[in-house]
Image (cartoon, rainbow, N blue to C red):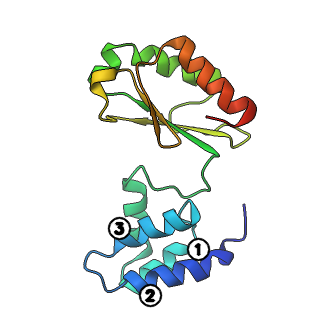
């Protein structure tokens, strides 16, 4: 893992810009994650001090929201929908296929850091279930074969 103190200039810049905004904690966390790809541990005491919060309060918010990451992200983020529509169209079988293919549990990352699996509970694509989002791009009406091809292409050459 990189030296997190290298991230302090960005963290301090975000804090200076956002600290006086009402309800500043979430905008600060989002801005830091957008800038660094995750929220490093070194950010927590800085945020707590700037907002007059305890470190436990900051960590509590980070841990409550599943979209916040405290480690650098995988190269590819795969978000599979687990909502009712996708489940009724084979989503549970696709989830099992993904876990087996990648050797992951939900919320896991491959050992090489290439792919993270993140379940979500609606992608807004119910009319074309089952669906997943890979690196922000929606893939709908998935079949087991289409999913296997998509994941293999992503793992082999990085084009997802």
Alpha-carbon distance for marks 2 and 1?
Answer: 16 Å
Does 78 sit left or right of 53 as displayed?
right
Using a 10 Å C-alpha cutoff, classify the residue at mark 1 as few (fewer than 14 neighbours), some (14 to 19) or many (20 or more).
Answer: some
Tag of residue 3? none
**Measured from the top left, where is residue 124 in percent x and y?**
29, 35
Residue underneath mark 2: 16
Tag 3 secondary structure: helix
Using a 10 Å C-alpha cutoff, classify the residue at mark 3 as few (fewer than 14 neighbours), some (14 to 19) or many (20 or more).
Answer: some
Q: Which residue is drawn at 41% across and 84% down?
A: 17
Mark toward the viewer: 2 or 1: 2
Q: Which residue is drawn at 74% across and 33% down?
A: 157
Examine the image and state in which quarter residue 49 appears: bottom left
**Measured from the top left, where is residue 160 in percent x and y?**
61, 34
Callouts 2 and 1 close, C-beta under 8 Å:
no
**Measured from the top left, where is residue 138 in percent x and y?**
44, 34
Does 64 sit left or right of 8 as displayed?
left
- Quick one: label 3 or label 2, which is nearer the N terminus? 2
Q: Residue at x 53, y 74 (%)?
A: 43
- Quick one: label 2 or label 1, which is nearer the N terminus? 2
Residue underneath mark 1: 42
Examine the image and state in which quarter residue 152 appears: top right
Tag 2 secondary structure: helix
Q: Quadrant of the N terminus?
A: bottom right
Residue underneath mark 3: 26
Tag 1 secondary structure: loop
- On the question of residue 49 being in view, the answer is no
Mark toward the viewer: 1 or 3: 3
Using a 10 Å C-alpha cutoff, classify the residue at mark 2 as few (fewer than 14 neighbours), some (14 to 19) or many (20 or more).
Answer: few
């Amino acid at each position: 893992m990189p030296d997190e103190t290298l991230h302090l200039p960005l963290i301090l810049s975000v804090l200076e810009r956002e600290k006086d905004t009402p309800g500043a904690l979430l905008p600060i966390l989002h801005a830091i994650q957008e800038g660094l790809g995750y929220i490093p541990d070194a950010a927590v005491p800085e945020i707590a001090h700037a907002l007059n919060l305890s470190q436990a309060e900051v960590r509590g918010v980070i841990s409550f929201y599943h979209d916040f990451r405290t480690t650098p992200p995988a190269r590819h983020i795969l978000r599979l929908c687990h909502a009712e529509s996708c489940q009724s169209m084979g989503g549970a079988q696709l989830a099992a296929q993904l876990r087996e293919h990648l050797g992951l549990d939900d919320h896991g990352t491959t050992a090489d850091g290439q792919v993270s699996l993140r379940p979500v509970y609606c992608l807004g694509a119910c009319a074309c279930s089952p669906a997943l989002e890979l690196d922000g791009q929606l893939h709908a009406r998935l079949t087991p074969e289409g999913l296997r091809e998509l994941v293999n292409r992503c793992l082999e050459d990085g084009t997802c």
